[in-house]
Amino acid sequence: MPRRIPLGSPLQLLLLACSFALAGYAGLRLLAGDWFGVALWFVGAALLHDLVLLPLYAMADRAVTRLLGAAGHRTRTGYVRVPAALSGLLLLVWFPLISGQVSERYRSAAGLSADGFLSRWLLITAVLFGGSAVLLALRPVRLRKETKRREPAAH
């Protein structure tokens, strides 16, 4: 008997088809103008990521893993990885405003000042790492509570 391929529910298939249609439409609209510039940007972004950024954050992750030791690798590195990834994503998205490179264009387009993006990004980064440190500090307390709940009652 041939194996049946799991396709999912009809709603999942409809959502997948709609997302492909939307992505295709966005791709056609994106490439309608300067298709060569867009293709060059995608290739450049892929090369920048693979040849520069990936080795940098792989080295940073190894340094954190060595710093925390072998025992802390699985349990504690997430407390550094998650805020670092979120902070890096915010930096990537808002880099032109954080660096102040487009402050005049931003002011003319939005009617708002671009001042303060660097300080806000630094504050958000500090809050992310601070919250992660608090969660890491509270981890032993949570673990003790969980082990107390699991211990069988002596009769």
Image (cartoon, rainbow, N blue to C red):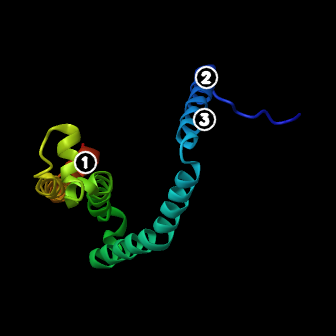
Residue drawn at point x = 37 percent, y = 76 percent: 62
Q: Answer yes or no: is residue 135 visible.
A: no
Instruction: Single out the mark in the foreground, 1 or 2.
Output: 2
- Gap in angstroms between the C-alphas marked 1 and 2: 42 Å
139 and 26: which is toward the camera = 26
- Tell me where residue 85 appears, x and y as whole percent: 32, 58
Q: Residue at x 44, y 73 (%)?
A: 52
- Check disc 2 and report the residue beneath it: 14
Task: Say which of 152 and 22 sits in front.
Answer: 22
Q: Position of residue 130 (x, y in %)?
A: 14, 57
- Comes first in the chain, label 2 or label 3: 2
* Residue 83, above or below 8: below
Mark 2: which amino acid?
Leu
Measured Cα–Cα span from mark 3 to mark 1: 49 Å
Is residue 79 rendered to the left or right of residue 119? right
Residue contact at pointers 1 and 2, CB within 8 angstroms = no
Q: Secondary structure at mark 3?
A: helix
The residue carrying pointer 2 sits among few (fewer than 14), some (14 to 19) or many (20 or more) residues within 10 Å by Cα, namely few
Task: Give whichever of discs 1 and 2 has the lower sequence position.
Answer: 2
Query: Which label sits on residue 77?
Result: none
Q: Which residue is mark 3?
A: 24
Q: Amino acid at mark 3?
A: Gly
- Residue count near mark 1 (Cα–Cα under 10 Å), binned few <14, some 14–19, many ≥20: few
Q: Amino acid at mark 1?
A: Glu
Q: N-terminal of the two: label 3 or label 1?
A: 3
Q: Is 82 left or right of 116, judged from the image as shown? A: right
In which quadrant of the rendered view does residue 118 lie? Answer: bottom left
Residue 52 visible: yes
The C terminus is located in which quarter?
top left
**Residue at image mark 1:** 146
From mark 2 to mark 3, how far is it between C-alphas? Answer: 15 Å
